[in-house]
Image: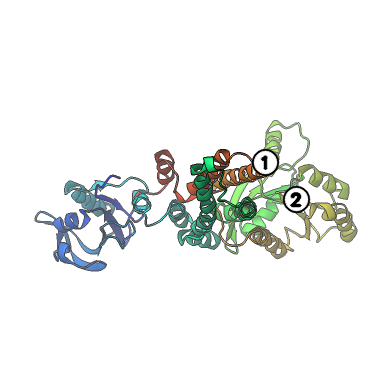
């Protein structure tokens, strides 16, 4: 690995009360000492902070505090220095220019975290969680990322790989004694292990729905006929006039998207054009976009009212858009002026609830009736995703894909045992399963994958 000493601004760009520049590498303390007028940094103890000035020859650049951290008890497991300065972008540029002139180089995106990984302080899953923690926009995503940084996912994977590795070693040993026809690995015990691995991997895969929801937010499409109250509902939820509201049908012709946080989870509400047959070219494009949003949504808010729809129309539409991974909340709107509400609702419940597990909520978007119940239903949806799996939560797409490949490999091992294939082929399938599990923690990876992962980090991390 490149052993250059690297430096970068660790705080956000722009003017601030303070800024922090960090350095990492064998020469970081020596380089900092060359530009620091205070104590001799080469002689100070680790994890200490020192007052002085950054100087360029006889010129003082800024009054600073410098923190010194000695390997291996640092983020990168290398000698590191952090310089706290007055948060001027100009001062930051001057200090960075000084450091590079004295032997450091500017860090690449994610290079500090990559060094922590390469030096064995954290594994790849934990490294990725650093970026997730920085990007966390709500409480739920913060908790998931922090658990991964603490090694929650890594520990689960390590247990799975450890169990599988023991059997793989025995199978490899059998290959060394192939001529003696000796069987070291109990095939029935291996089958039991494989079943256990399948169950645990499936639980991790199921947790991705929750992990992805809290990390990236939940897409919620608001659907219904023209003038059903979709824009009124969006405005009521946001508590601002975000969408144009009019009694004229077809006012909304494009999608309007807004993010709202409810109990720590981000919900991305998408107000769509009213769905109907139309000869208006622009409105037709909006209707097509609305249908596309239904396909992309995780939750569908279907608005209707008994004044403008029949129960059968609602039933037919829901059956048309139904898919197992779509949560549909049926919102009977305008209940403040509707007639025969209970009879209307009962027809829908009788036809849909038993087979489709949808939820029907009576609301008035205009009068803001039933909105608390709607919010509760949305948070319950996320909580129900969480309850589908215990323990670690997967929120990273790369981890999800690696686990999918791991599950396929494990199932091939099971098939190989059932078919009593040769030890050589069984060993091959076991190695594949180990390699796929190892991709998550970085036990098996390549430079291209690492470059892609760390290139998405911010500079200075």
Q: What is the x, y in percent for residue 196?
A: 63, 56
268 over 422 or under it: above or below: below
Which is more toward the observer, 122 or 178?
178
Query: For the residue carrying disc 1, how many other residues have a C-alpha within 10 Å: few (<14), some (14-19), or many (20+)?
Result: few
The residue shown at (68%, 62%) is: 380
* Disc with the residue nearer the chain's start (1 vs 2): 2
Give the camera-side residue of 82 and 24. 24
**Mark 2 closeness class: few <14, some 14–19, many ≥20 residues within 10 Å:** many
Which secondary structure lies at badge 2?
strand
The answer to whether mark 1 and mark 2 are in CB contact below 8 A is: no
List the residue tagged with mark 2: 302
Give the foreground label among 1 and 2: 1
Looking at the image, is 361 positioned above or below residue 400?
below
Disc number placed over residue 419 in the picture, else none: 1
| Quadrant housing residue 412 | top right
Image position, residue 117 (x, y; %): 38, 52
Q: Looking at the picture, tell me which residue is in the foreground, 67 or 421.
A: 421
Q: How many marks?
A: 2
Farthest residue, direction left: 58
Residue at mark 1 to residue at mark 2: CA–CA distance: 50 Å
Q: Classify mark 1: helix, strand or loop.
A: loop
User: Looking at the image, can residue 333 be seen?
Assistant: no
Image quadrant in which the N terminus is located: top left
Task: Provide residue 110's location: percent of width, then percent of height.
Answer: 37, 48
Label disc, if present, on residue 366 of the rendered structure: none
Side of 180 relative to 101 (left or right): right
Instruction: Say how the picture is coloured.
Output: rainbow
Query: In this image, 104 relative to 395: left or right?
Result: left
Q: Residue at left 88%, top 58%?
A: 346
């Amino acid at each position: 690995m490149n052993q250059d000493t690297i430096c970068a601004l660790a705080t956000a760009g722009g003017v601030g009360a303070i800024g922090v520049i960090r350095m990492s590498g064998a020469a970081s303390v020596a380089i900092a000492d060359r530009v620091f007028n205070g104590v001799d940094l080469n002689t100070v103890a680790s994890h200490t902070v020192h007052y002085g000035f950054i100087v360029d020859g006889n010129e003082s650049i800024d009054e600073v505090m410098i923190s010194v951290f000695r390997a291996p008890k640092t983020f990168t497991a290398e000698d590191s220095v952090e310089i706290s300065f007055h948060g001027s972008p100009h001062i930051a540029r001057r200090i960075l220019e000084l450091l590079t002139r004295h032997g450091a180089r500017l860090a690449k995106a994610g290079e500090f975290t990559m060094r922590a990984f390469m030096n064995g302080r954290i594994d790849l899953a934990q490294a990725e969680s650093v970026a997730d923690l920085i990007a966390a926009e709500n409480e739920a995503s913060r908790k998931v990322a922090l658990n991964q940084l603490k090694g929650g996912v890594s520990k689960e994977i390590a247990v799975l790989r450890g169990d599988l590795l023991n059997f793989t070693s025995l199978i490899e040993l059998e290959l060394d004694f192939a001529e003696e026809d000796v069987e070291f690995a109990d095939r029935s015990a291996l089958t039991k292990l494989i079943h256990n691995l399948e169950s645990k991997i499936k639980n991790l895969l199921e947790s991705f729905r929750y992990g992805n929801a809290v990390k990236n937010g939940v897409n919620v499409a608001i659907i219904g006929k023209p003038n059903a109250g979709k824009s009124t509902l969006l405005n009521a939820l946001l508590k601002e006039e975000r969408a144009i509201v009019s009694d004229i049908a077809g006012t909304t012709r494009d999608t309007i998207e807004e993010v709202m946080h409810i109990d720590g989870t981000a919900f991305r509400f998408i107000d769509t054009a009213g769905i109907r047959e139309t000869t208006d070219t622009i409105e037709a494009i909006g209707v097509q976009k609305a249908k596309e949003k239904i396909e992309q949504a995780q939750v569908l808010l279907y608005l209707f009212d008994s004044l403008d729809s029949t129960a059968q129309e609602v039933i037919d539409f829901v059956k048309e858009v139904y898919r197992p991974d779509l949560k549909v909340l049926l919102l009977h709107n305008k209940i403040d002026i509707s007639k025969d509400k209970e009879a209307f609702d009962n027809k829908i419940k009788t036809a849909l609830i038993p087979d489709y597990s949808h939820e029907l909520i009576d609301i008035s978007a205009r009068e803001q009736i039933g909105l608390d119940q709607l919010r509760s239903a949305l948070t319950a949806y996320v909580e129900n995703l969480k309850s589908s799996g215990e323990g670690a939560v997967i929120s990273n797409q790369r981890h999800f894909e690696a686990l999918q490949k791991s599950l396929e490999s494990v199932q091939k091992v099971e098939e190989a045992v059932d078919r009593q294939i040769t030890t050589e082929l069984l060993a091959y399938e076991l190695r594949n399963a180990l390699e796929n599990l190892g991709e998550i923690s970085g036990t098996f990876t390549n430079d291209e994958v690492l470059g892609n992962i760390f290139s998405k980090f911010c500079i200075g991390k």
